[in-house]
Amino acid sequence: MAVFKPENVEDFFEIGEVLGSGHFGQVRQVRERATGTCWAGKFLKIRKIACSRLGVDRSSVEREVEILQTLRHPNIVTLKDVFESRAEVVLILELVSGAELFDFIAEKDNLLESEAIEFMKQILEGLGFMHSKNIAHFDLKPENIMLSDKVSPNPNIKLIDFGLAHCFHQGEEYRSSSGTPQYIAPEVINSEPLSTASDMWSIGVITYILLSGLSPFQGETDEDTLKNVIAMKYEFFERYFSTTSSMAKDFILKLLVKNPKDRMTAEECLLHPWIKPITRKQVANRNRSSINMKNFKKFNARRKWKMSFNMVLMCNRLVQLKLLYKGRSDPDPLQVRPLYSTQIRAHSHLAFVPCPSTIH
Ligand code: ATP
């Protein structure tokens, strides 16, 4: 069992700027008073009443902490400590100071497949390590793939956000309906028993986007997206994949497979010729092929815009709740689960986000 320290986190850490926000709280830079070292503090509001929609279950936080404690790998964020007060738990995490991988790539003028593969390799190594411990992430998406730092020309991948991760025990059947429609595997939507193979589907989607700037199953609404996933409705449009190697397409084809048992594992991916070429011809193919940077930049701009839109929506909702709860002694409105839950069923009301014409 993970130890949650009952001490006040502020006695040990100075709380600094906000680094990001999630469903149940904020992530802030914190500075260790004793050493001056900077970390990331993930502040999670804990649900006080079992049936309440406010905050996160303590048991979910315990699960996230136990999983993070199991995972020590250069491509996975490290957990240092956990503090607990009456209303919140604070995870002290390794500070990941680089950008999201997609933002880093979108800054470039062009990128060869061979360069993109160096990042893919690290993602697969982190994932392979998790899977070897029977742990699945279940929320792989561009927002959760970050880079270690801003300064080095070749920063390392760091996988973050283990809030939906699950450790499989022998003979256990696990189902979940959580995730993000664009990246979710068909077995999640169909409420079938899950395995680490669901992460491999998400890797297929992420690779497809990385190469083309197109999201394979994205529909007008979340419902449409989920329908497209179930129908396996995707193809490699020549217009978007004209600079993509056939090996890269083969890599994706072996991941976007309906039956989870037929998908490549992370280990198998690392041996696929697109990642680990054997012949000279394969090496040359990777160096000749590049990602569709023009469209990738457009995709990333739209993605960031949607994230900001969702954040505004969430803030508006908090303001409304504050007004609603004004004068009442019960729930603290700031602990209310924000509007955009990752539960796929609750996603639909956010479905169509109009983007400004400038980034169309
Ligand atoms: P979600 O609602 O997406 O499930 P969450 O509540 O589980 O999110 P995280 O995804 O872990 O929270 O963190 C939210 C954001 O905070 C991230 O998108 C990232 O920008 C930032 N962040 C998280 N962990 C770190 C870290 N270790 N170092 C730097 N920034 C971080």
Image (spheres, grey):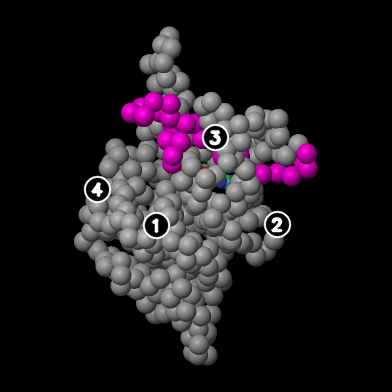
Q: Residue furthest right?
A: 35
Q: Secondary structure at mark 3?
A: strand
Identity of the amino acid at label 4? Glu
Q: Secondary structure at mark 2?
A: loop
Which residue is under mark 4? 223
Find out if the beta carbon at label 3 lies less than 8 Å from the nearest ligand 1 atom. Answer: no
Q: Name the N-terminal-most of marks 3 and 1.
A: 3
Q: Name the N-terminal-most of marks 2 and 3.
A: 3
Identity of the amino acid at label 3? Val
Which residue is under mark 2? 151
The foreground one among 61 and 270 is 61
Work out whether residue 278 can be spotted.
yes
Task: Kindly report the distance in space between the C-alpha atoms of the residues bearing marks 1 and 2.
Answer: 37 Å
Which residue is under mark 3? 89
**Residue under the point 26% across and 67% down:** 259
Q: Name the N-terminal-most of marks 1 and 2.
A: 2
